[in-house]
Image: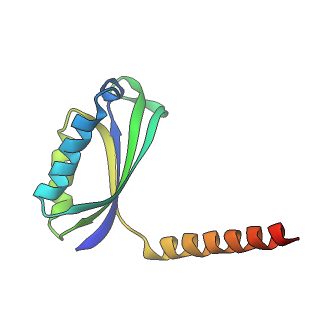
Amino acid sequence: MKEYELTVLIHPDLEADLDKALDKVKSLITDNGGEVIKEDNWGKKKLAYQIRREDFAVYVYMEVNLPADAPLKISNTLNITDEVLRYLLVKADDKMRQALAEQKEREAKNEAESSQD
């Protein structure tokens, strides 16, 4: 299984009952043999342009493990799901994650050194 990043833009009218829409996306992932590693709700944000006559959407970011045939099946299903305005499913970039981890370590080290002074 490979790691993927899935960002889903959910219809803003579903903000009050977001769990139902998210459960639908999560069940889609697990039904295709995948697993959700991490989930981060970024909240309701204004879109750069209208999508299906909507100016806002609820952004949800997920890190998932998927087998080889799952991304195509998930993409096809998300395309016809009414709750989802847009989605982006990309393979996780290990080099970028390593660079971010190193940057956080450097920042923590710099903060520790500056607090000692």
Q: Is residue 31 above or below residue 8?
A: below
> With 70 as the anchor, is 111 left or right in this view?
right
**Residue situated in front as seen by the camera: 78 or 107:** 107
Expressed as whole percent of the image width and height from the top left, the position of residue 96 reads 51, 71
Residue closest to the far front: 116
Expressed as whole percent of the image width and height from the top left, the position of residue 10 reads 32, 36
Q: Is residue 87 above or below residue 103?
A: above
Residue displayed at 21% across by 52% down: 75
* Quadrant hosting residue 37: bottom left
Expressed as whole percent of the image width and height from the top left, the position of residue 114 reads 82, 69
Expressed as whole percent of the image width and height from the top left, the position of residue 90 reads 34, 61
**Residue situated in front as seen by the camera: 93 or 61:** 61
> With 54 as the anchor, is 70 left or right in this view?
left
**Residue situated in front as seen by the camera: 92 or 65:** 65
Image label count: 0
Residue displayed at 75% across by 67% down: 111
